[in-house]
Amino acid sequence: MSKTVRGRRPPASVAVAVDLVIFTVRDGRLHVLLIERGNMPHRGEAALPGGFVRDGEALDATARRELREETGVVGDTLHLEQLHAYGAPERDPRGRIVSIAYLALGPDLPTPKAGTDAAAAHWTPVSSILHGQVTLAFDHEQILRDGLERARSQLEHTTIAAAFCKEPFTIADLRQIYEAVWGVPLDPSNFRRKVMKTDGFVVPIGERRLPEVGRPAGLFRRGPAETLTPPLMRSGNVGLR
Amino acid sequence: MSKTVRGRRPPASVAVAVDLVIFTVRDGRLHVLLIERGNMPHRGEAALPGGFVRDGEALDATARRELREETGVVGDTLHLEQLHAYGAPERDPRGRIVSIAYLALGPDLPTPKAGTDAAAAHWTPVSSILHGQVTLAFDHEQILRDGLERARSQLEHTTIAAAFCKEPFTIADLRQIYEAVWGVPLDPSNFRRKVMKTDGFVVPIGERRLPEVGRPAGLFRRGPAETLTPPLMRSGNVGLR
DNA sequence: GCACTTATGGTCAGTCTTACCTGAAGAACT
DNA sequence: AGTTCTTCAGGTAAGACTGACCATAAGTGC
């Protein structure tokens, strides 16, 4: 296969795949989309959704295509970023497969239907994986942990937390995202002050939402800002319930 | 080539390469290691060093091997981290090549000798590339820009700046790293206070360095700390001279 | 009305940052 | 020796930001 590639030593024969860590927040807890593998190896086990890169397809395009196939969501509405490349020689028994992992964040998505390669897909609480109640195929648990750490870090420095929220949303909705991803409770008052003072994080819509109980909350949309300066810092003690 | 990979659609035939963004600081300016390409395509043009992943070789191992081949430096002494994967279909005229870029940071290294695939290798000021005086082959300018941004960000949140310094070093040496990478002057006094107060960033060696002019400066080694909390923030106006 | 819940806004002390200022320790020069 | 120059080292005061906490507002259900 190296006929098109000249080099001192022919490059290894490698397949490139894309795996997706798709996070959402449901009932105040962080969930990740897992599939039950329909093919060997690891048939019947839980794994991250993903698939191979096709001829002439950019990596981002593969990620968006898989995202659409697995969740039915058009990628343009979701935050999607590259996470890391995993290429340990023995990570997949089928042969040399380098996987480019992507991180996707979105508001509470519809329960996905089974995709092409998946017997079934469901939202799984991240804590159940971290606590060993669910085990993942391949090196997908490591990918998930890396994705979680990236998401936590992004919440500190950027405004992507709003990507988890269906618009319009309240400040409390946004705060619950932070609490779910970081695994720590935040002071509502201080959180509000910080968010409101960051220019362009959220913009008020002027309306209110009537809750079942409590004072009505103001509604907001995402603002144009992308970075948080200064960052919204987590004070160290993070973890998932 | 898909005989070992079962799937609904055979994966694209892809070669995987590793490219290196190797930074160092010389004469108070940030430099990157470039090679002059010895083979087609882009023969004779400047490019980042790199090479193909070999059979059974992990990605990190490829990066360390290339680092050694290009610079003669044993990778264990350098900071090395994965940066990003680049996989646009047309990024390399030889065919579909996905490149995993790595970022390496090190103290002023010996002028490297030509590597396997390189006609020549030299340290090039990053500013000359950013200002268009030097153009890079493939999409390597984008990789370089991403690497620069990563390095700048890492300086804020971690202690890797010390990886740029040959031990022992002075606080002023460390500060010049920040100034070179961020492209802004820093207040020596405030910088010192911040570094000294961060537990485990640097440890005093008890000796002093006699400069050509001025008061002798205390000498330090790298400390065990890896993260900076709170971060050492750049106040927005960054850029390279 | 009253109890309860959540949203919103404010206070206050402590910490960190920024922009300065002052003195210390050496070399070079007169 | 004494002065000047340079850089290192440390300090100070104003302001920004954080975290803990309190107070009030605006709904619901009784």
Image (cartoon, coloured by chain):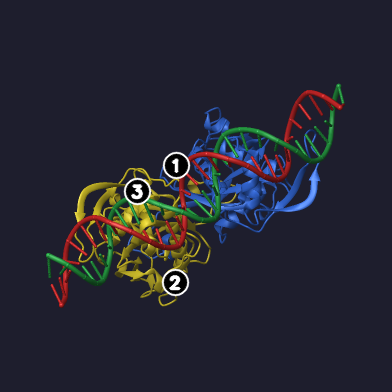
Chain colours: A blue, B yellow, C red, D green
Query: Is B233 situated above or below B114?
Result: above
Name the subunit of mark 2: B
Q: Amino acid at mark 3?
A: Met
Badge 3: residue crowd in 10 Å (few <14, some 14–19, many ≥20): some
Q: How far across and down, in percent of the image, does residue A25 sit?
A: 65, 39
Q: Mark 3 near mark 1, Cβ–Cβ under 8 Å?
A: no
Query: Label 3's element?
Result: helix
Q: Is residue B95 left or right of residue B194?
A: right
Depth-wise, is mark 2 or mark 3 nearer the camera? 3
C-alpha separation, residue under disc 3 versus residue under disc 1: 43 Å
Q: How far across and down, in percent of the image, does residue A21 sit?
A: 57, 44
Identify the image quadrant of the C terminus of chain B: bottom left
Badge 1: residue crowd in 10 Å (few <14, some 14–19, many ≥20): some
Numbered circle sitting on residue B130 = 2
Q: Is residue B79 left or right of residue A78?
A: left
Depth-wise, is mark 3 or mark 1 nearer the camera? 3
Query: Do we see residue B6 in this rendering?
Result: no
Badge 2: residue crowd in 10 Å (few <14, some 14–19, many ≥20): some
Depth-wise, is mark 1 or mark 2 nearer the camera? 2
Q: Which residue is mark 3?
A: B196
Query: Label 1's element?
Result: loop
Q: Mark 2 near mark 3, Cβ–Cβ under 8 Å?
A: no
Residue at image point 42% right, 47% down: B228
Q: Amino acid at mark 2?
A: Leu
Residue at image point 60% right, 52% down: A80
Figure quadrant of residue A229: bottom right
Name the subunit of mark 1: A
Numbered circle sitting on residue A91 = 1
Q: How far across and down, in percent of the image, does residue A168 sit?
A: 75, 48
Ranked by sequence position, the earlier of labels 2 and 3 is: 2
